[in-house]
Structure formats: C-alpha cells, structure tokens
Image: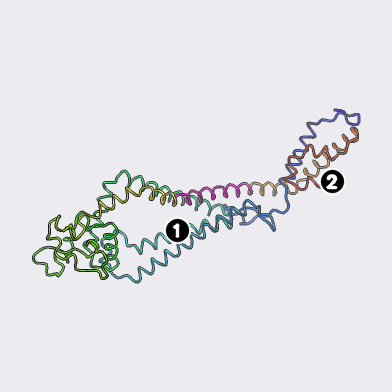
Amino acid sequence: MLCGGKTLNFDAVNVYSTNLAMAAALRNPGWEERGGGSSCHTLPYRVGQAPATESSLCQSMASSIAMVTVISMVMVAVGVYARLMKHAEAALACLAVDPAILLIVVGVLMFLLTFCGCIGSLRENICLLQTFSLCLTIVFLLQLAAGILGFVFSDKARGKVSELINNAIVHYRDDLDLQNLIDFGQKKFSCCGGISYRDWSQNMYFNCSEDNPSRERCSVPYSCCLPTPNQAVINTMCGQNMQALDYLEASKVIYTNGCIDKLVNWIHSNLFLLGGVALGLAIPQLVGILLSQVLVNQIKDQIKLQLYNQQHRADPWFTTVCRHVLWKSSQCSESLSISPAPFVLLTVEPFLHTSPLLGVLIKEL
C-alpha cells in the first residue's frame, strides 16, 4: 500500500508493533526477585501487590495446610502425654507398636510435611513445594497399596487380627485402658472372645484348669453377658463359670459368638462408609498435590519472566522499535488522512491488556 508516495510494508509494521507489544508486556520495572541466587527459586513479585490468582491460591493452600499442622501438633501432644503417663508395658506387648509412639511419629511426620507445604506456599519456594508434593504422593500411594494388599491378602489380614485379639485377651487384666477397650468392643458387636467365648481360657485369671486359684476361674468378663432390661446396676459377676457350660446353655446368659466374625460382618455391611472415609482422606491429598504443582508452574513462569526482564531492561532496541512503529504509523496516517492512534491500536490491541505502557504510547501519537 502507498503512504505518502512510498510503499509501506504492512508486514514489517506488524512485526515491529508485535515485537513492541511483546517487549512492553514483558517489561515491567515493578518486578523484583526474592530468595537470592539459590537453586530453590522463589516467585518474583510486584511491589505493593501480588497477582490476584497467585495470592488467593497461596493463601487458600496455606490456610488449609495450617489446619492440618494444628492437628499434627495435637497428635504429638497426646502421644507425649500418653507415653509419660502410661507405665503398663506388659499390656502393650499385645500390640506390634506402642500407640503413644505411633501418635508421636505420625504427628511429627505430619508436622514436617505440612510445614514444608505451608512455608513453601507463603514464601513461594519451589523446593519446599516440590518436597510437599512428593511426600503427599508417596503417602497416597502407600495408602492405596495398603488397601489393595489388605483386599488381596484378606485371609492373612484376618489371621493377624485374630492374633491381636488373642493377645489382647491374654493381657486383659494387665491394663485398665486395654480392659475398657475390650469390654467396649464386646458390648458394641455383641460378641465374646475371638472365635468363641471359650477363648477366655487363654487368660490366666479365666483359665479353666483345676490348679487355677483365681476366683474368676472358668468365667468370662461381664461385657459378654446379655443385657438385662431396666437393670440399674451392672452385675459384674454374671459371667461366672460360663466356660463350663455348653454352647446352648451359655447362649441363654452370654454372647457365645466370637468377635472376629462379628467384626468381619460389620466391615462387609459398612463398605460404603469405609469407602467414603478412605475417599475423604484421599481427596485432600490429591487436591494438595494438584495445587502445589499448579503453584510451582506459576512460580517457574514468573522466574522466566523475571530473567527476561533482567536481560532486556537496558536494551536500547526497545526505544528504537517504539520510535520506528510510531514513525511508520504517523507516515501512513498522513497519507490516508486518519488518526495514527487507531492504526497502532489496530496492530497492538491484543497486547493492550498486558501492558499499560502501550496505552501511553498511543496517547502520545
């Protein structure tokens, strides 16, 4: 096209204007860098105000993780208290792991994990966020593997549960908390013993041997007894000599079915509830993994932008391109008798929302 008697190459003008718009969009003197030159980069930020999407993402992620951090601290406190106050080591022999120590270990691991996520999201640190995401992924995979193995090897899992219940029966009188737990389970599931009520003969106090001097010989705990309507006071001696009776006679007074079968039946009848609990535990983990990866990608993009700004901040090419595009647009507008502002606006309009500097240049036409 001819402008002022000369041929004006619109492709060249478009290239120059596009480069101008890209340079103006990428150039922003308000950006600074935090975190130094470490390989664990942090997100460059705008002085006085962070981008809205990044700020809301960081705040929501940090607040959610902070709640889990508080829960982990409570778990550690409860575990330490239980460990300091409990002295019945013999009662803990029936368990593979001391529950107090398990609480402390899980609480400390949760605290360290959530600390990485919380500080990483607030400081926008890539290393901490990637550590948080990796640990969450490992925990999720371990939970998934445990569920699959428990389903595949259900027979072995049943045998392990039976072993734990039998060990708990042996140590029934050694610890009050263990005793209350067993009594609660037998009342809840209306059962007695592991496989049958005669399993209580494994306990030294309830053993049916003739040389047992215990007053509870051949008896069962009161939690095995059938409930009596309108009974104001619990009869703790209702299980006396129940092991000496046959199944039919004993079933009139106590529960004769074992707790293992009752527990298995309860699990089968509440699969949807257990699945909902497992899903409720998995969803926050998956959301945490997703949000941390999104935030890491945003940080990496902003780091690339910051590096570009540092490399081109003092580049005289930017000023040269500005002048050339303005001169070309003015020359064409004189020939076509139009304002140069629409010409430049038509060329660089897609980039106006990314750079206020282009608007200033158009006003100067």
In this picture, which residue range is highlighted in magenta? Answer: 281-302
As drawn, is 37 to the left or to the right of 193? Answer: right
Of residues 34 and 190, the one nearer the viewer is 190
The amino acid at mark 1 is Met
The amino acid at mark 2 is Lys
Does residue 212 sit above or below 274 in this rendering? Answer: below
Q: What residue is shown with label 1? A: 110
Determine whether label 2 and label 1 are within 8 Å by CB: no
Please give the label number shown on residue 342.
Answer: none
- Disc 1: CA contacts within 10 A as few (<14), some (14-19) or many (>=20): many
Q: Residue at x 14, y 57 (%)?
A: 249
Query: In the rendered structure, does residue 286 fall within the stretch colored magenta?
Result: yes
As drawn, is 269 to the left or to the right of 59? Answer: left
Q: What residue is shown with label 2? A: 363
Give percent across and percent down for residue 107: 42, 61
- Image quadrant holding the N terminus, namely top right
Q: Residue at x 55, y 57 (%)?
A: 62
